[in-house]
Structures are given as structure tokens and as C-alpha cells.
Amino acid sequence: MDFRFPRTSFIKHSFLGLLFLTFLGSPSLAATAPSPQKEASASLKLALAPHIHHFKNGLTLVTVNDPYSPTLTFQIWYRVGSRNEHRGRTGISHFNEHMMFTGTQKFPHGKLDTLINGVGGQLNAFTDYDFTAYFENVAPDKIDLPLAIESDRMTHLLLSPDQVERERNIVLEERRNDYDDPTQKLVEKVYSTAYAVHPYHNPVIGWEKDIQRTTRKDIRNYYRAHYMPNNATIVVVGPIDEATLVSKVKKYFGGIPRGHLAKDRIPAEPPQHRLRMTVVRKPAMLPITMMAFHTPNFRSRDAMALVVLAQVLSGGRTSLLYQDMIYRHPVAVDAEGSYDPMTADPGLFYFYAQGLPKTSPPLLRKRLDAIIRKVRTRLVPGDLLDSAKKQILTQFVMNQESAFGMGMMIGMMSADRIPMSYLTDYVRNIQAVTAGDVRRVARKYLRTSNETVGFLFPTGPVRRPSFSRPGRIVR
């Protein structure tokens, strides 16, 4: 599974959707209930209790004891993704993820599914720009099974030639499906146009020619260079006895030696100084315009203001994009966007609009530009700003209600080396964003010289009509 663009928003700053809009619209509830900000602060303190353990071989374990969860999630996160790949070997992180399911001597091909399904659990994996992660969701008393599985395949992957070729064909089919999807093709073109030198230029799944020429030796070398305890974090959330779990992790992983982790030389993306454009012409249901702007990640003081700006612009049906393009000036059937601060390197703040059948992509861009001008020149109304912040905080808290969601949040932070203070200070930092901050970051980043525009012009009907939102998830 590979996280497409954006990295499944329900587990990032926008988390689970806009489920509490009904609450916001109820005056009687608003008058009697505590404010959403206070509820968010209280819930965050109750839900978030991570304990971090470090082992001598460099392995990190993060535990969260959730006694009310019926299941336990075991996740192992490796700090390696497509940003670590070199030219000519794109897609090898995802290819390697596939190979991790092809077997060891202890767990031959197909055995993992049999074992996990046999205890009523789930397992899967996903590859992203910044990380590759594997998870098993099981009953709490079955914790030894994922421990045995993940410790074994950290070092004992067989990588048989037959399995390499089998998985190559599967990955190539996934790659072709992405190419045939007009929306994903547009996303791919926008990213490859916006990034000139940084590896975010490449799709997570890789370029087809690179997948075809990747060898078994390439995969083995990549596996040995990155799959080691000092490049991994284990996250366990659920009903646990912490001391027992630490002892078990030491038993299963403690004997695996620390590996030599070479320092990656990832080129920094130079500033963009002029408008860039790209065009896709493919069979599609409807026209699409996508606009992307380079923005900093969590390390910047502007990150929280950008999170709020994204919510104001594209946070559901009350957002500026939706209100303008769907209702006031009906030119689109959908208009959304996102900003993700939880990335290892600076990412993109993007918008997209899927137009009505006879709407042209340049007209969609004209409407998007008009909305951007508004947030650059005017202060966001207080009620809209408050609503956006309440939505963000409620979604943030709701994500912690599931063991898996909490694990994903902590795992991504660990993989991107985001300090835990990001979570503990999140509510306060969102609350502190002002209308002036929102206008300031809009002026700073949403400017034409920092912009990449992508147009999708439909050339005819598709065989199987569908619309997939921009994303980057590959299994």
C-alpha cells in the first residue's frame, strides 16, 4: 500500500473528516456544553500517553496503553521511502515492501496471512515518500505473533528469484493502473513539475522503466542498507502491560545487531521563482485543475497557520472553495485541497477542482485564483476562522479514539523525526492562530512565482467512469 497524495488526510492534520459540523450548528448544545477547544485539550491529555523506550541496538519502542481498546495494533516503521531512492532505482522502497510478504524460512510465502487470519487479525503495509510501515492488528493476547513475524523478516528475507519476478509483475500492474487513472496522472505530473531536484519529484510507486530494471541484487542491497533496528520504530497501542511488552521486544529484537546506516544525501529543492505549468490530455469524466505551492513542513513557525489556512479554504462544504465554486459560481462538482506539515522535507500546499462537463480547466483556475486573492488581501471572518479551528481540533482528538489511528499518528511522527511536543502543543498552537497569521502565510506562499498548475483536459469518455481524489497510496 503506498500513501498517495495527500497521505490519507484522516490520519494527518485533518484526520477523520468533518464529523462535528452538526454539533457546531446546534445553539442549544453550544450553550450548555464545554467549548470544543477545552474538550480537545482535555481529550488530548487523556488519550495521549506515549512512553518511549530505547534499546542498545538502536531500536525505538513507543507504547500507548489503551485499556479500553478491544484490539491491539503492532506497527513497525522504517525510515526509508521513495525520498531515499536514487535516480534509475525509483520504486524500490515499494518493491521491497512487496517482497517483505514473500517469505522467510520460518514463515514461508503465504504463511503470514494464514497465521494472522487464523487469530482473527489483520496485517498490511504501506510505502510513502518518507517511510515504509508494516502492521498487525490482533487481540491483545496474540502480541507474540507480530513480534515473531517482524523480528524474523527484519533480517531473514529470502528474496527468491521467482518471487521477485512475480511481485515485479504485480507492481507493474499497479503502476499501469496509476498511469491509466487521469487524476493520478495529473498529480504525478504536478509533482514532477513542481520538484526539480528533490526525490518528491518521483511517484512513490516509481517509474515503469525503473521497476522493470530493478534486480534481485538491487532489492537485497536496499533491504540490507535500511532494514535494521537502528532505522526502525515499533509502535504498540492497546491494552498492554508495559513492562511485559518491553521484555518481549527485547527478547525478539534485542539479538539483532545494529546496522551501518549510511547518511543519505538528499538534495534540497531550490526556491521556485516562476510559474510552472503542465497539461494532461486523457480520457476522463470531467476536467480538473490542480494548483500547488511549495510550503515548509512542521519545523516552520508558519506550519500551524498553514494548517488553518487549508481548513478555511478546503475544509468541507463550509469552506471558501466549496462555497464559491459549487454554490455561488457553480463551475465545479468538487473543490478541495490540503496542506500536510508532517513530512520529512518541505512539501506542497495544493488545491484541485473537478469541473462541470463543459467547464474548461483555465476557467477553474480563474475561480481558484479569485479565492486565493481573497485570502491574500482580506482577513478571514472571525466565525469562519473559529469554525475551521474547531473542526481541526475535533478531528485531531477523534483520531486518537482508535488504537490504529493513534499508532499511525505516532508512527508517522517517529518516521519523520517529529518531536512529541508537536502533539502535546498542537491544540494550543492551533488555538493561537489569528486571522492575521492566515493572511500572512497566504501572502507569503500562495503567490504565482511559487505556483505549479496542472490542467486535465478530457479527450473522450473513459471505459469505466470513476473519479479518484488526489492521493498516493500503493499496496
Image: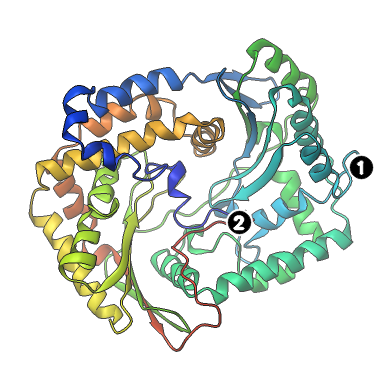
Q: Amino acid at mark 2?
A: Glu
Q: Position of residue 115 (x, y in %)?
A: 82, 38
Going from N to C along the chain, the mark reached first, 2 or 1, is 2
Front residue of 365 and 317: 317
Q: Is residue 391 visible?
A: yes
Determine which quarter of the picture holds residue 106: top right
Identify the residue at horizontal 47%, vertical 86% (top origin).
461
Label 1 neighbour load within 10 Å: few <14, some 14-19, many 20+: few
Reply above or below: 340 against 335.
Answer: above
Determine which quarter of the picture holds residue 443: bottom left
Determine which quarter of the picture holds residue 63: top right
Front residue of 433 and 238: 238
Q: Amino acid at mark 1?
A: Gln
Identify the residue at horizontal 20%, vertical 74% (top origin).
366
**Residue under pointer 2:** 85
- Quarter of the image with the C terminus is bottom right
Q: Position of residue 458 (x, y in %)?
A: 41, 84
Q: Is 353 positioned to the left or the right of 161 in the image?
A: left
Reply above or below: 57 against 109.
Answer: above
Label 2 neighbour load within 10 Å: few <14, some 14-19, many 20+: many
**Residue under pointer 1:** 105
Reply above or below: 241 against 164.
Answer: above
**What sort of colour scheme is used for the picture?**
rainbow
**Which residue sits furthest left?**
378
Q: CA distance from mark 2 to mark 1?
A: 28 Å
Identify the residue at horizontal 75%, vertical 55% (top origin).
219
Q: Position of residue 26 (x, y in %)?
A: 20, 36
